[in-house]
Image (cartoon, helix red, strand yellow):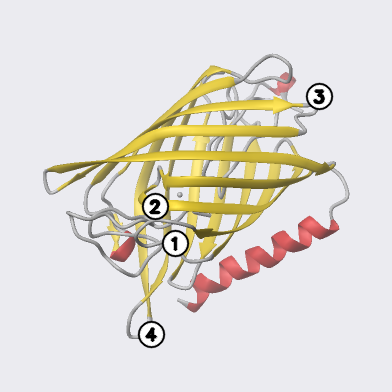
Amino acid sequence: MKRLLKFPVVAGILFISFGLQAQDSSLVGSSSLKSPNFQIGSNTSISQEKIADLKPDSPQGENSKEDVRPFITDDSRVVGNRLAQMEAWMRIDKHEGQQWLMAAYGPNKWLELSIGGVLGYEKSEQGGTNFSYALPLVQGKVLFREYESGKGPGFGAVLGSFFPGGKGAFKPEGYGTFGFLTVSQCFGENEDVLIHGNLGANYLHIDGSGDLLGTWGFGSQVRVHKGMHLVGEIFSGDPYVPGAGISYQVGYRYFFSDLLQIDMTIGEGMGGESPLPFWFSAGVRIVTERFLPSNKRK
């Protein structure tokens, strides 16, 4: 367990160092994986009758910047035609530590396919730590219209599911199917200000019953200087983690290039029957042009 904790802490230190030193040019942010009687992000289980409140990010176009976990609110872009990306983010609160990993591929200009999972530890009531993991998480994202400055908002849709595979507290006891619509708008020639909105639901399939939980999110990204951006959002529910209450998240995102970016955030629950505890999160996104024809690579 000490090794699992050591990796996120070291990763966080490196991200801070990069953000402070770079001069040129985003895990739950996932919150708890929680549905009746299973969770990530809280050490209390809940009953079928009562779901306690408790996380793509998102890919984008070939030559543009996009949002990444730990940002919960997704944008209206996909990774890009024949581009692939790897997203990794960690999240730590007083109850547990999570390490997420998501891989995505864009077979064309309007579709993105992703698969991933989470591993980490949860603190027990006796003071020890228990290893846990959950997988796979599968997701598809469709772009209806890409946003551009001065040309109106972009629109998209996401559909996915977390399968009940894994071990320990992170393992879902049933299927959770989620779907939501995305809308995004940017302002400024260099996308100096981005605004995103999400609206959807998570349908839980556990013990033959079905619970429909609404989700929504509103977020923004503002350029500060070159590759440095400030990010913030307020959301209710996480498509990856059913039942999360109203929470906020703020931090920064740094773009080294269109192919590499890092994020660091803090957040906390503001409402619900069991508000999320204060958390720290950091993420990295790496895009590869390996599947592009050689004459189109940067």
Q: Tell me how far mark 2 sits from mark 1, CA to CA.
A: 8 Å
Q: Residue at x 61, y 29 (%)?
A: 60
- Which amino acid lies under the numbered mark 1 shown in the image of this protein? Leu
Quarter the N terminus occupies: bottom left
Residue 256 % position (x, y): 77, 44
Residue 127 % position (x, y): 38, 85
- Which amino acid lies under the numbered mark 4 shown in the image of this protein? Gly
Q: Quadrant of residue 64?
A: top right
Q: Which mark is residue 127?
A: 4
Q: Tell me which numbered mark, 3 or 4, is placed earlier along the sequence.
A: 4
Q: Tell me which numbered mark, 3 or 2, is placed earlier along the sequence.
A: 3
Badge 2 marks a residue whose secondary structure is strand
The mark closer to the camera, 1 or 3, is: 1
Q: Tell me how far mark 1 sits from mark 4, CA to CA.
A: 20 Å
Instruction: Return the residue at label 2.
Output: 244
Outermost residue toward the bottom?
A: 126
Badge 4 marks a residue whose secondary structure is loop
Instruction: Return the residue at label 3.
Output: 189
Q: Tell me which numbered mark, 2 or 1, is placed earlier along the sequence.
A: 2
- In the depicted view, which residue is nearer to us: 206 or 168? 206
